[in-house]
Structures are given as C-alpha cells and as structure tokens.
Amino acid sequence: TAVLLDVAEGVVINVDVTYDASSRSLLGTYTPSKSGQYQLSILHEAKGISTHIRGSPFALNVIPGATFAQESIAFGSGLHSGVAGDNNGTATIQALDANRNMKNVGGDEWVVIVKSVLMNDYQYGTTLDYGNGTYSILIVPEVAGPNDLSITADGKHIRGSPFRINVVHNAVHGPSSFVVDEGEVSQMKAMTENIFTIQAVDKWGNKAIYSQEHPHNTSVSVESESIDTSATQISYGGGGKYEISVKPVVSGEIYIEIMLNGKDIIGSPLPVSVQPGDFFADTSVATGVGLRRAQAGVQASFSIQSKDAGGNDKVQDDAMFNVTLTLVERPLAPFGIKMFRTNATNEVVVTGTQSFIEEGQYLIQYTCFEAGQYDLMIKDFHGNSIAGSPFSVHVAPGQLSGTQSIMTGDGILKGIAGHISPVLVFPRDAYQNYILDGQEILEIVLTLKSRHQSKWEEDDNNLVGEHNTKQLVGASSDGSFHLDYVTVYAGVYSLNVVTFLPGGLKASYYSSPDFATEHLVFSSIEAKVDKDFGSLPTCQNNEDNTCGSLSDMAGPLNIGAKWIGKLKADVTESYEIRVDCNDGGHASIAIDGVDVMPWHPCWPYALISTVLTAKRVD
C-alpha cells in the first residue's frame, strides 16, 4: 500500500497500487491537487503487519502545473481607473495552474489590450515578467471614459477579464484645445459683447471635464491690443468648456490670443474680422464749411461721419440725425434805419436734411434766409449730440437785390441846381437782409427829361434827353452807398440806380480734388488765374480764428480749385489757351460746357487750341 500526506495541511491522498504481471512489479499512481511538500509512504503488509520499504517515507516537492489562464488572476487599482496618456502600472497578474496553485516561475506570454467602450480605439499593453509567476501590467490608455482591459494567454481570458477601467483625461493641453464654433470668433462687432466658447482638452484630445478640479486646475488667459481687457469675462460652463466674452474696441482685422495653461490654443492668435458697432452720436464727427458759415438763400452743406462708441467709422446706413439751426443773434441795422421785418421778433429755426453718401457718411444740407448768427444743433433721435455740437454758424447776406434795397434822401425827389442833392442807398439782399460789407458797386445815372422855360436859349432845349450824369460808387464802411449828385440845369430828371458785381472770375477752393460741395473751403472774385495754394488761408476748423494754409490743412496733393468766368473774342479765329502749373498738377478746360481740354497733366504747362466767335461771350 502507499499513502501520500500533505505535510502542510495534514491531508492524506490515496495512492492506487496495481501489479504489472509482465514486469512483475507494482505501479503506484496519485494526483495531488495542491503544490507543496508531501510524504510518500510505501508499506509492505505480511501477516497483518505493515512495514516501510527501504527509504520510506519519501519526501516529495509537488510543483504547480501549467499556467491556466481561466484560473489566473490580476489585481491592483490599475484594473479599475487610469489617466489618459499615463502609464497605469499598478496592476499585477498572478499566474495559476488549473488547480489555482500559484506559479512560481515565469515565462508565460500575456496579451494585454485596453479598448475604449465609446470609440473604436485601442492600445496594446505590455507585461514585465518577474520570473516568479507574477507580472506587472504596463498600459497607456489614450481615450478618456470607460475602457475594457482584456488579459489573455493562449486566447483565454484570465479570471474577471475584461476589466472595466474608468479613464480620466490628463492635464489640459493648450495646443490641443480649440474654439467650439469658429463662426463666433471669425466675425465680431465692435463695442459690443461678443461671446464664444472654447473646449479644453488634454494632449490626446480628451475633453477636460474636470479641468477646474484638482489636480487639473486650468488657467485661461485672453489677450489683444484691440479689445477692452477690463470688459473681458471668462466663465466655466462645465464639461471642459469655457465661455469667453470680449469687447473689441476697433473695427477691421484684429487678433485675439487665447492661452490655456500658458500655451496657445489651436489657431491662436485668432484672426477676427470686426465690424463697426452700433451708431453712437457722441463720437460721430461733422466736417465742412456749412458748420461755420453760409449765405442767405444759398444751400449750405457739411458731412457727418457716423461712428460707433469706440470711434470706429460706420459703414452701413443706420444713423438718423436731427439737424436744426436756431437764430440767436440778428445783425444790427445800418445807422438811421429801423429794423422792420415781418418775423423780426419771432424765433427762426431751420431744419437740415440728410442723405446717405457712402461708408457711413451723410450729407447734411440746409438753407437759411435770414442773416445772423445761428446755433447749429446735431443730435440723434434720442437727443444725444454729436461731437462738437452745437456749432456756431454765421449766415451772411446774399447778393444785393435792387428791389429789396432801400433808397432814401431828398435827392430822390428834388434838388437845387448847383447844390449837392443827397441820395442814400441801404443795400439788402432778396430776403431783406442788410448788407454791411458788400463788394458791389452802384452806378447812378441822372438824365435830364425836361427844362424850366424861364431862362433858356433856343439851343438849350437840345439838352433834353442828352444831358446825363453818371458816377460809380462803392459801399461805405457801414455798407451804405452815398449817391449824392450835383445838377447844372434845373429841370425834371430821371434817376436810375443800378448794381453789379465787380468783374473777374469766380474762384472756388476745395480741400479735396473731387470738388465735392461739402469740401468747399471758400470762394472769391479774382481778376485772373494766378494762385499759390500754399498761401490760401482757411479758418473754418480753428476755434481761435488763427489761420493756416489750405495746403497745410488738406495737403498739396488734395487741393482742388475751379475758376468760372467769360471770354470775349474780337475776331473769330483759333485761340490758344495755356495753363501753367507745378509738378503733379492736373487741369481741365471747358467752354460752353464742352471739355476742350479733358483732365490733363499741366506741368510745366498744358496748351490747347479752340475757335472763339467774335463778339460772343463764352
């Protein structure tokens, strides 16, 4: 008989002993299920007495059987949780045989795979063989969320495989983070809150849903020279998303730099096309001669550049202006004349009209009929004034009107031959405004119509209709005309007074070469075309009334001038007309509305030939 004893447990395992007749020997068989130290006792029984054979009991060391994957185990925190991109090496495999005896030697080949449950993404792991039946698992999952970790040998899973691992994202990585909706960033509006969202992710593209928790605390910075940094707001919306609000202060192309943990996100600095903000009266500006002066009865104009709150030029037509001129000071009447006007005691208010030009610019036009000093108010329809409003506008009288001028003095009804007969004319324009500093010239013509018959010679009657007195008179310092006359002959005379402007060319000077009405600086009557633009004065933008030159204001390449007059030819033939100007100058000539010389360089001169008709005024 034979008996196998488990020394550690004290358990006896039966041994089957059979006789083999062919070999005339006894064969014992046994199957221990546990590895360890055993004693094998072989006894011979004779006459009821059991005796150990030589060497019995034998000491046996039973080693584990072949590795059996289904009974092998794994343990450690790495089987349940991990960090994307990190080596989760805290899991260990313990190889066991089919009877769950722990292997004490290595050499097994394990296949370790970690696979995302949510995505079709997986990585192979490796094992480190310690040679004693244990193996460390080395896995680097890249996808956050639930992952399945499978451990197999010979295609068989170990006990508990696959294991469900909860993988969290790694630290936020700026260069992998991005703007959720690029459309929210590519187009913005100046001086307005613009909101967009960025998604924080780790280096492997996992959404950093714990980006505001330890140990993932994330820093977010937004920088740009073109935004109001004091208005920038950053708020965490959960799920690794940050809502950012910025207020650009300039329109046009700007760049915004966004950094997470000190590194730029994808595309940063981000290009942004900023449109002007909402119309804002306080920053809008007006320019043009019509802000300072106008002439009664003549349409005056100026332009307004609409802007947003940041001073950016508007482009669209979305502004409405309320333009009013209120008469605040009437000019004094000439000495000796009582002011008499139907509306002299009433309030005078003139309303301007607006029309859109382009690029956020508006043309404002108005016409005042009463001379004086006006307050020009420019407001939006909420009552907010534009920059510089109110402006002070001086409206000068129009050209002298004979029918509206006042003529007085004894000389208009009677006179004494050989004595001065006084005639006084107070000039007014067509709107009854007194002209105190006009350039007009009056001509008085006194023609004898009939003579007294008390003393005349027979031939003296021939003087009737032929005898006349003419004189030209300019205005005095107060604007009145003293047309005093002296007659030689007694009789009845006709007294005619006519007015005309001094001869010359009407010159108009502009602060731009496009001859736009709103860019007219001033006009004058000139005897000839001979002008140095550097010496042309302008005061319309100077509050202290100090004058610079037109070229200082607009620049020498941004000046336009126009002369309008008449030509009278004595003989019908071809005439040469020549224009001299300095380098860079251009000129055109039109006669009777026909361009005889289109826009053409005139340095050092431009010359054209044209036929003028004799005695005709062109």
Image (spheres, rainbow, N blue to C red):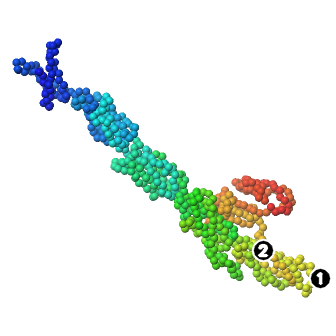
- Position of residue 520 measured from the top left corner of the image (x, y, whole percent): 67, 63
Local SS, label 2:
strand
- Label 2 crowd bin: few (<14), some (14–19), many (20+), radius 10 Å: many
Asked if residue 10 lies left or right of residue 493, the reply is left
Disc 2 marks a residue whose amino acid type is: Leu
In the picture shown, does residue 541 fall above or below 41?
Answer: below
Q: Nearer the viewer, residue 578 or 8?
A: 8
Measure the alpha-carbon separation of dots 2 and 1. 35 Å
- Position of residue 104 measured from the top left corner of the image (x, y, whole percent): 23, 30
Q: What residue does disc 2 label?
A: 442
Asked if residue 157 lies left or right of residue 380, the reply is left
Looking at the rendered image, the quarter that the C terminus falls into is: bottom right
- Quadrant for residue 517, please give it: bottom right
> Which numbered marker is on residue 134?
none
The structure residue drawn at horizontal position 7% and vertical position 21%, both measured from the top left corner, is 50
Disc 1 marks a residue whose amino acid type is: Glu
Q: Nearer the viewer, residue 414 or 588?
A: 414
Kindly give the residue lying farthest to the right in the view shown: 458
Kindly give the residue lying farthest to the bottom in the view shown: 454
> Which numbered marker is on residue 458?
1
- In primary-sequence order, the first of circles 2 and 1 is 2
Residue 392 visible in the picture: no
- Quadrant for residue 431, please give it: bottom right
